[in-house]
Amino acid sequence: MPTTKVEIRSGAYYDSVILMQLQRSLAEQPGVIDAGVVMGTEANKDVLSQSGLLEPEAEGANPDDLVIVVKGDAEASAQAALDKVDELVSSRRSSGGDEDYRPHSMETAAKMLPDAHWVLVSAPGRYAAGVSRQALGLDRHVFLYSDNVSLEDEISLKKEAATKGLLVMGPDCGTAIVNGIGLGFANKVRKGPIGLVAASGTGLQQVSVRIHQMGGGLTHALGTGGRDLSEAVNAITARQGLDLLSRDPETKVIVLISKPPAPKVAGELVKAARSAGKPVVVNFIGYATASRRVDNIFFATTFDEAAELAMELVDVAEEFAAEPDISKFARGQRYLRGLFSGGTLQYEALLILESYLPVVYSNAPLDKKYRLEDSLVSVEHTVIDLGEDEFTVGRLHPMMDNDLRLRRFEKEAADPEVAVILLDVVLGYGAHLDPASELAPAIAEGIKGAKDAGRHLEVVAVVSGTDEDPQGMAAQIELLVEAGAKVETSNDAAARYVGRLLQAIERSAEPAEKIEMAQVDLERLKKPLAGINVGLESFTESLSDQGSQVVHMNWKPVAGGNAKLAGIIERMKSKA
Amino acid sequence: MPTTKVEIRSGAYYDSVILMQLQRSLAEQPGVIDAGVVMGTEANKDVLSQSGLLEPEAEGANPDDLVIVVKGDAEASAQAALDKVDELVSSRRSSGGDEDYRPHSMETAAKMLPDAHWVLVSAPGRYAAGVSRQALGLDRHVFLYSDNVSLEDEISLKKEAATKGLLVMGPDCGTAIVNGIGLGFANKVRKGPIGLVAASGTGLQQVSVRIHQMGGGLTHALGTGGRDLSEAVNAITARQGLDLLSRDPETKVIVLISKPPAPKVAGELVKAARSAGKPVVVNFIGYATASRRVDNIFFATTFDEAAELAMELVDVAEEFAAEPDISKFARGQRYLRGLFSGGTLQYEALLILESYLPVVYSNAPLDKKYRLEDSLVSVEHTVIDLGEDEFTVGRLHPMMDNDLRLRRFEKEAADPEVAVILLDVVLGYGAHLDPASELAPAIAEGIKGAKDAGRHLEVVAVVSGTDEDPQGMAAQIELLVEAGAKVETSNDAAARYVGRLLQAIERSAEPAEKIEMAQVDLERLKKPLAGINVGLESFTESLSDQGSQVVHMNWKPVAGGNAKLAGIIERMKSKA
């Protein structure tokens, strides 16, 4: 008759690999139907129960207790298997073979392998912060795989690391690739020009494998742990990662991945990313954005899209390095005036400019708090829709009649605070048959007037039309260009060009503040990776397989995992 | 000495072209410095004031008054110009030449050109609804350019049109292209496979010119007027447009453009668009979306992007026509069970599935109200992250240890309500060295068990890895495929495939309801366009230039624009 036998061991520590292997070995013993070997947490007891392995004796087990359950086809076979537990555990343990050569302290490990700049920590959560703190004390970066680490520990570890120019990836950081070597779970991805910063383990993996599958490759892929982008942690590791990859000349494109961050943190990270000087693909999975692109930031919504965007951007990355030339503007010139005839062109321009300029006033604003008090009087940055109903009672639409716009243009051009005037010129049937013939002279005059007054007036015109339109698009463009205007056929491109220009002016007035952090040494990151591994043996094997030098530290919890005893030892230490 | 003279004419109607031409003619008179000819609205008086043309006499003018201002270098020249007003107006009027041949009523116009299925209305706003109503009465589509039309009139016109299978584009509809002919403001765009529906005039124009510039072309571009997507109007015209273009075999891809609609209307329109049977690019300018794609819907954030997406989708449009084959599933099979080892893969899958399935339960849901009460027990559609902390205390991560997942898989496969099981298989260093060897037998067994019970179990596996991973990606995929799984390397693609499948099952259970509207006749839309134009003469010229037949109706407001008199006449008519 099938019988289930249970054994509970209190205060004993075994690593998870050993537990898994013990469970498998038990299940393979003669007459055994199923076996379970777990720590006695509620979740684990539920799992036992689902498998029909939760006997009354196991129900009372604590999270610190090791629960061993064997279901045999008879009482004898179950008991026989249980009796073999110690033998199975120690046979497994000795199979490692080189136990004697493994250091028992991190100091020894560090002396054995002085080049090991990385410490991998996968000890159980409640011990992991302590181990990590030791690593930071020895000036090592930390790859902190363990989960169940408290938020307070995470914050204090990361703050300490930041002041020392060290990285703490994690806790609960499943994966990273540093200089071609995978830490934790990591795919073999070829080297290449894309760098990743990710608060999401399988996100990092999926994006890196998609990049590899498309023929691309990575410089570094830096994990941060899932909580890094919370308001409490304030993205310390992600900021360090962004900064590192921005400075790394081999990284041409950066990809930033996370589940939706705290909005404040998201905003600050995106702001930091905008001064990276290279394209940054952002995938805050499930984070709704109204724009798909802001300056050098490209928002992706899936991992596939992030990988594809990154691949496409590699070829054009150089374009993002240069700042626009603003030396030609006079002191005090800083505002935009947009004079649109097309309502939706104006609306799209406002929407794009929103990502560049803090406030843009309008007679048809995105947010009504920026509505102009008087549509006829511009305030700071102002973009006007001259086709609004207020202007068209008993008057032709501005696409047909330029009168109102010409009068306004003249006034704006004469304003010494104006740096840029943005116009649309909509061609096609129904529209004015030769708008450039009226606009071009006004533009030339405005530019000349500014020049005479020692200023530079930038005029940007969006020409919306086709080569078959009755006005003759090429001729219209030629007239405008001759008058001194920069002409775009894309409203999107025109608005972004203007935004970049004005933002550069704004930045030159008040440069952005830097976050107080010691820089992480880029050169050290580029050395062949060597590490000390504390916890899962498989991580040591992985590093070896990848050709990295690694020391496996023979870590055991203080007092063999007995929390009470460990507490006493800790207190004695702190008194010493 | 410069002197400004003013003349005010009450209750007189002139169309805007005449006012513009009068102003220009006056400005060209000898000794005249500037001139203004406007209706006496507050906005127009502000404009006069800005130009230094607002004299005290003009300040008291009403919106119905025509205000004529002339600034001369001396009183005599200003007065001389003013004295020529009547002469200038009548010389312009007679220059049309063919006034005598123009009908004065719409009935006559319709008889003159029975093929004119379209009436273009650009009469002043307060008259425009009445003119449009006449057109609907004569079974004509209406292109309503006029602005300043009331919301109530818009709703009543559109409701009437919808019951008759007619379109009312507008009010404030600046542009449309029907069967190659531009109405209002419209660019000359070549014919091609893309159809547009737009609540935004220059948005429609900008997207169509960008399509043309890239070598593409349009079937029809249907304007709706800017208020159509408000909750009050409920997108009557946009729905008609979508329906028309969905039925039109020549339209391969649809583009839908609007400023952000009312959220309820946006949701309903997107829902309608999903059954279009072809790709629909949606650009609700400034409308934030978390996904960039849902099924056949592609969200664009700028006009350029909308045009580019539409061009790319033309080639693959056929793929969207077919519904997935769900005949193999047994009655009652309808749920998804997702068993993920990768947390962020699970998160992305949930995010994508959100657009397909009303509710997906999880131990790590997007919205906590869909959190499973018991992580071990699936409810309806359920997607589990087996790597959550709750499962990993004293237990290896599911990327290393398949035990938990195998047990769960077996259980889900046996559930007669389950149609699809979705899995991830994450390869790489640190992960299980041969996961497929454990998963494939379970998959084969699950599929066989379902088959034996008369069901079909669809197993979809996302394999995340590279060809250089230690597991050997190709071999892993082969094992899974042999076991009967559908394998994807993109999580995105896998989730969408599953979403489409389950949605088809759901739809087969309860088909979507149709909106009550008379269908607009597609064949009539495809006939050579002919029209009756009421209002701006330039629109008549445009149609002529494009080779369309057009009758210009010699419209004047009742009682010459005298509102009091018009009211009396209206009342007399209604009594008759």
Image (tube, coloured by chain):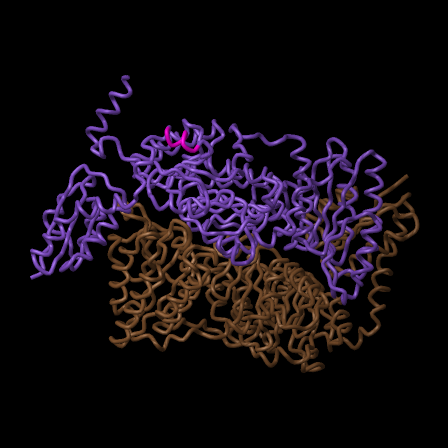
Chain colours: A brown, B purple
Horizontal and vertical percent for residue B202? 42, 51
Position of the C terminus of chain A by quadrant? bottom right
Position of the N terminus of chain A by quadrant? top right
- Residue at the (78%, 57%) spot, across then down: A19
Magenta stretch, main secondary structure, is helix
In this view of the protein, which residue sits in the foreground, B282 or A49? B282
A487 vs B472, left or right, is: left
In this view of the protein, which residue sits in the foreground, B146 or A204? B146
A522 vs A418, left or right, is: right
Horizontal and vertical percent for residue B90? 21, 44
- Residue at the (37%, 70%) spot, across then down: A482
Examine the rendered structure and indicate whether residue A67 appears above or below residue B106: below
User: From where the camera sits, is residue B493 visible?
Assistant: yes
In this view of the protein, which residue sits in the foreground, A570 or A41? A41
Q: Tell me, yes or no, whether the highlighted magenta stretch contains residue B471.
A: no
Q: How many marks?
A: 0
User: From where the camera sits, is residue A262 visible?
Assistant: no
Q: In which quarter of the image is residue B564?
A: top left
B467 vs A411, left or right, is: right
- Residue at the (38%, 43%) spot, across then down: B540
Horizontal and vertical percent for residue B143? 41, 39
Query: As drawn, which residue projects farthest toward the top?
Result: B576
Examine the rendered structure and indicate whether residue A200 appears above or below residue B69: below
In this view of the protein, which residue sits in the foreground, B273 or A400? A400
Residue interval drawn in magenta: B108-113
Horizontal and vertical percent for residue A297? 51, 64
Examine the rendered structure and indicate whether residue A290 appears above or below residue B145: below
Q: In which quarter of the image is residue B429?
A: bottom right
Examine the rendered structure and indicate whether residue B24 appears above or below residue B522: below
